[in-house]
Every structure is written in structure tokens, then in C-alpha cells.
């Protein structure tokens, strides 16, 4: 029991860390790309900074809203499925026993044993057994939409602050090389960190994140150069 408790907490922590690293990653890529795009269109240092700050706020709010809506709608649909299941258990007990038995047979139990497992689990906690094994909802899963929204917004803002700090420190002429180089370094570190937390290869993780970041920055800077020449 204690071991299961510990394990669940570890996966919770990894999920949380993963979300934070992904948020910071988004913050770096989108803000660095935005800043480079505006700078490539020959904007002044001050205007590049304003665009970057606006991008930080817009991105953080968009992450918060997206995360809140996603967690809430997931919780709503799980609740609706549980309500339906509860009603089915009240009205069709025999049918629900057959349903759960069939699920265990499909997973490899002999029919007689599957029937016995279904009976014992349903005698213990019928709704819990159906939630887990039929709907795939873990009973302990409690969605925290506000917390998820704040975590996403904060991690995005922290990521976005890195290229903005580079903008603040760079001269107008050195802005593009300084922002792109420092952002790629931040991305490589973050990608490596994320891979390490998840137990994956650090070099592969760092290279993957850096590649997509470089692509995003190059494309936005290209568009900025194009429109900067036209305007
Ligand atoms: Zn059921």
C-alpha cells in the first residue's frame, strides 16, 4: 500500500515537471521567434522589447486558458461517464457483471476466473471497478484546473523571460545573433533536462528541442525580413 502511494506520487511529480518544462520550452521558442521576426523587420530596440513583452503576456494567458479549458472538459466528461455508469449499475446489475467479466476475459483471464474477479471487485466497489477497468478512469485522479492553468502560465512566462533578458542586454545591431544563440542554448539545456527527468537520452532530447526551436526562429525571422523589406 505504501509502495503504491509512493509510486503514484513519483508519476505525479514527473507529470508536473514535464508540464513545467514544456511550458518554459514554449515560452522560449515563441518569444525568441517573435522577437527575431520583429528585429529582422528592422524595428527599433524599444519596439522589439515591447513586442516581446506583449508576446510573454499573450502567451502566458493563452497557456492558462487552454490548460484550464482542457482540464475542466476532461473532468466534465469523466464525471458524465461516471454518472452514466452509476445509473447502469443501479438498473442492470446482471448486465454490468457480464460486461466486466467480458473485459477480463479479453485481457486473458479464463472465463470462470474472470467471473469470480468481476464478482469480488463489484462486491467491494462496483463503480470503482467499472471506472478503472471499463472507462479507464483512476479513482484517485482529481483534476485541479486552476493549479494547472497557473503552472502553465508561470512556466511559459519564465521561459519567455530568457530571450527577453537577452534582448535587454544586447545592442541593437547584436540583437539577432545574441537572442538566437542564447535561446538555442537555453532550449538545449531544457531539452536535456526534460530527457533526464523522463529517463531518456539527454543528447537526443537536447538536439530534438533545439532543432524545432531553430526552425521556428529561422522561419519567423525569414517572414520578418520579407515584410520588413516590403514595408
Ligand atoms: Zn459498466
Image (spheres, rainbow, N blue to C red):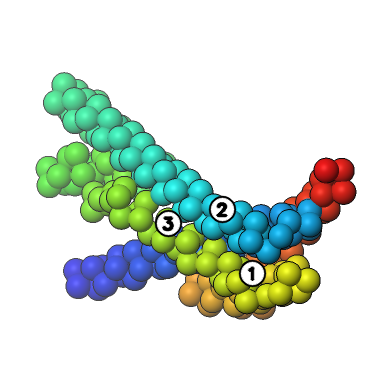
Figure quadrant of residue 81 = top left
Residue at 31 percent across and 48 percent down: it is 145
Q: Nearer the viewer, residue 107 or 135?
A: 135
| Residue 188 at least partly seen | no
Q: Position of residue 90 (x, y in %)?
A: 14, 26
Sequence-first tag of 3 and 1: 3
Sequence-first tag of 1 and 2: 2
Q: Position of residue 207 (x, y in %)?
A: 70, 71
- Label annotation for residue 167: 1
The quadrant of the image that shows the N terminus is bottom left
Sequence-first tag of 3 and 2: 2
Q: Indicate the secondary structure of the residue bearing disc 2.
A: helix
Q: Could you tell me if the residues under marks 1 and 2 are in contact, i.e. CB atoms within 8 Å?
A: no
Count of marks overlaid on the render? 3
Q: Is residue 173 left or right of residue 23?
A: right
Q: Within 10 Å of the Cα at label 2, are there few (<14), some (14-19), or many (20+) other Cα atoms?
A: many
Q: Nearer the viewer, residue 2 or 66?
A: 66
Figure quadrant of residue 188 = bottom right
Q: Within 10 Å of the Cα at label 1, are there few (<14), some (14-19), or many (20+) other Cα atoms?
A: many
Amino acid at each position: 500500500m505504501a509502495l503504491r502511494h509512493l509510486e503514484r506520487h513519483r508519476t505525479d511529480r514527473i507529470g508536473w515537471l514535464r508540464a513545467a518544462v514544456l511550458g518554459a520550452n514554449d515560452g522560449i521558442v515563441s518569444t525568441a521567434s517573435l522577437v527575431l521576426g520583429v528585429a529582422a523587420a528592422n524595428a527599433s530596440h524599444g519596439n522589439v522589447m515591447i513586442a516581446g513583452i506583449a508576446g510573454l503576456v499573450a502567451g502566458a494567458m493563452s497557456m492558462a486558458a487552454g490548460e484550464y479549458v482542457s482540464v475542466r472538459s476532461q473532468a466534465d466528461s469523466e464525471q458524465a461517464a461516471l454518472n452514466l455508469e452509476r445509473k447502469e449499475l443501479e438498473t442492470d446489475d446482471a448486465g454490468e457483471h457480464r460486461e466486466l467479466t467480458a473485459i477480463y476475459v479479453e485481457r486473458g483471464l479464463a472465463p470462470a476466473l474472470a467471473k469470480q474477479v468481476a464478482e469480488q471487485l463489484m462486491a467491494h466497489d462496483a463503480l470503482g471497478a467499472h471506472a478503472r477497468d471499463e472507462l479507464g478512469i483512476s479513482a484517485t485522479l482529481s483534476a485541479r484546473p486552476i493549479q494547472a492553468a497557473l503552472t502553465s502560465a508561470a512556466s511559459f512566462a519564465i521561459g519567455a523571460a530568457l530571450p527577453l533578458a537577452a534582448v535587454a542586454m544586447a545592442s541593437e545591431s547584436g540583437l539577432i545573433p545574441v537572442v538566437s544563440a542564447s535561446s538555442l542554448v537555453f532550449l538545449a539545456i531544457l531539452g536535456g533536462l526534460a530527457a533526464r527527468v523522463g529517463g531518456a537520452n539527454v543528447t537526443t532530447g537536447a538536439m530534438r528541442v533545439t532543432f524545432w526551436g531553430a526552425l521556428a526562429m529561422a522561419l519567423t525571422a525569414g517572414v520578418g525580413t520579407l515584410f520588413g523589406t516590403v514595408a
